[in-house]
Structures are given as C-alpha cells and as structure tokens.
Image (cartoon, rainbow, N blue to C red):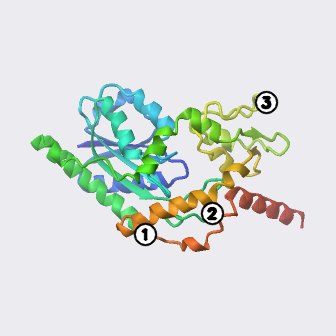
Amino acid sequence: MKTLIICFSQTGNTHKIAECIDQGITATGSQCEMKTLNETASESLSEYDLIGLGAPVFWYKEPLNVQDFIEALPEQNSRHWFVFCTHANVIGNFFPSITEKLSKRGAKVIGFHHSYADLTVPFYPYPSYTTGHPDEIDFQEAKAFGENIVERSVQIQKTGDDGLIPEPGPVSSQEWIEESKTMTKEKISRIIPEFTINTETCIRCRLCEENCPVGGIDIDAEPPRIQDPCIYCWRCVSICPTLSVEADWAPLAAMAPANYARYRKELDKAAARGEFRWLIDPDTIDLNDPLYKQWQRQLKNRENQKKK
C-alpha cells in the first residue's frame, strides 16, 4: 500500500503528530510519504492508495486554506482518506465538516485522529489549558493510529464492508458545533483586528513573509502588504522578533475570562470521558495576562539587556 500524508502545520505540533502517524504506517511495511499542503499537487494523488490530511483546528473547524485545497481536488473515485488534527480547548465540528467536503470530492474517509496541543493565541493567556500537549502519550497514540488505519483500509478493500468505518468524531458539545457553522470567512474577518507593519521597528528579516501559509505578506510593497489574503492564523504576529506586526488585541483579550470558562467546561467533560489529560493546573493560569503583553515584556527585557 502506498500512502501520502498531507500536512498543514502552523507551529509544528500537527507536523509532529503526522510524523508519528507516518512511523505507524511504515511499521506495517507500507510505503508512506509526507508533504506539506503547499507542496502537494492534487493531480499527483492518483498514485496513492491511502491519503491522510492533517491540520490544526481553526475557529472550531478546518482552516480556510485547507478548505480551498479540498475544493480544488479532482474526483477521488472512492479513494481511501483519513483525517487528523491538533487542537487546544475545543475540537468543534472539525471532523464532520472536513469529511463532508472530502466526500463531495468522491473521497471515502475511513478514519479520524485528534491530539490536544499547546495554544499560542496573542489575545489569550499563556500557559494555556492544553500546555504540555502533545506529549509522549499523544505521540504513541498517533503511531498506533497509523498502524490501525492501514489495517482498516486493507480490510475494507478486501471485504467491501463500509461498516468498518467509524462515524466522524469526536465532536464537541452542540453549542460549539453550531458556533463553528457561523464562523464564515466574512465573520472571522470582522472579529480579527486589522494588522499593520510598523516600518520604523521592522528589521526586514522577512520571517512573516516567508512563514505566511497563503503568501499574504509583501514587505517590499508600499505600504507593506499584509492580510491579503489571510487565513487568520496570526503566525506573522507570533513569529516577528520585533513585534512589528501590530494589532489592537485588547477587545479580544477582554473576552478571555468568559471564553475560558466555557473551555473549562468542555475540557472537564472530555477529562471525565477519559479523552483529555490535564498536564497543567488550570487554576494557576492568569486569565488577565494575554500572550501579546507577555511578548511585549520579553521584548522590553531584551532591549534593556542590550543597553547594559
């Protein structure tokens, strides 16, 4: 069996899980290749028997660039696919949403895997509720999934028994599923503040430009182009060494305590079901200290050290 894993990873966590799934697949004696979303040509997929697609959860479902990738796929003719994701507090409607889109392209989605992962959102506190994930247990579970998905694909091909395919899941509570459906590109663009590049502090390292997953930044433009296009991943904000990608995060930061109360309920339910392990004491998190303020303090400390 020849397998391809396609991965979009924002901070590296999804890529780590993809590598573990790859290890599990190759442990069965099957061939497996890994490619990023941007380097995968949809016309090249016909040579694979099994395809995996992995991404972080954005806004309680699959990221916008993943949606675009799926919509551009040619007819899959019932080719076997599996889907995996990393997420922080809430997985939302990721699996049902992405499965529906893949099925419309003729894919047969035969398996699902998720892992909790650290959250580094500018307007939320750090550490987060899921800091510490993915850990070694998460990696071993991903490897086991890789082994199992090959066996499942082989059995379905041999027997034609689609009853071996599980329902897309897990999913979050209904409130999150409904919320995911309202998170259109237009609504997200209204929620996220406008980004600007401070040309006085920008050192033109181009890290933001090089790491934008959709090529939405051009430092050489006058004025510099940013968020055109944008999938609202704020990677450019988190990677800038001089914090020159600026935005007004205060309104969103003010919502953190209320949102974290909702997240806590979801995670407590998941923990009670044995689906989540607390690796940090949630009561120790300062909900009024968002990450963007921590970055500002760290930058100021670095500058003060240079002056000494």
Q: Which mark is residue 30?
A: none
Secondary structure category for the residue under label 3 = loop
Q: Earlier in the sequence, mark 2 or mark 3?
A: 2
Distance from disc 1 to disc 3, alpha carbons, whole Å, reads 46 Å
Which quadrant of the figure has residue 70? top left
The type of residue carrying mark 3 is Pro
Q: Nearer the viewer, mark 1 or mark 3?
A: 1
Secondary structure category for the residue under label 1 = loop
The type of residue carrying mark 1 is Arg
Crowding at dot 3, Cα within 10 Å, few <14 / some 14-19 / many 20+, comes out as few
Residue 96 horizontal/vertical position (percent): 35, 43
Crowding at dot 2, Cα within 10 Å, few <14 / some 14-19 / many 20+, comes out as many
Task: Indicate left or right for 134 with 105 as reference.
Answer: right
Image quarter where the C terminus lies is bottom right
Say which residue label 2 marks. 126
Q: Earlier in the sequence, mark 1 or mark 2?
A: 2
Residue 293 horizontal/vertical position (percent): 74, 59
Residue 104 horizontal/vertical position (percent): 32, 30
Q: Is residue 122 visible?
A: yes
Q: Nearer the viewer, mark 2 or mark 3?
A: 2
Say which residue label 1 marks. 277
Residue sitting at x 38%, y 57%:
20
Residue sitting at x 77%, y 46%:
244
Secondary structure category for the residue under label 2 = loop
The type of residue carrying mark 2 is Tyr
Say which residue label 3 marks. 223
Q: Is residue 223 above or below residue 188?
A: above
Residue sitting at x 58%, y 32%:
186
Residue 270 horizontal/vertical position (percent): 40, 63
Crowding at dot 1, Cα within 10 Å, few <14 / some 14-19 / many 20+, comes out as some
Residue sitting at x 37%, y 34%:
101
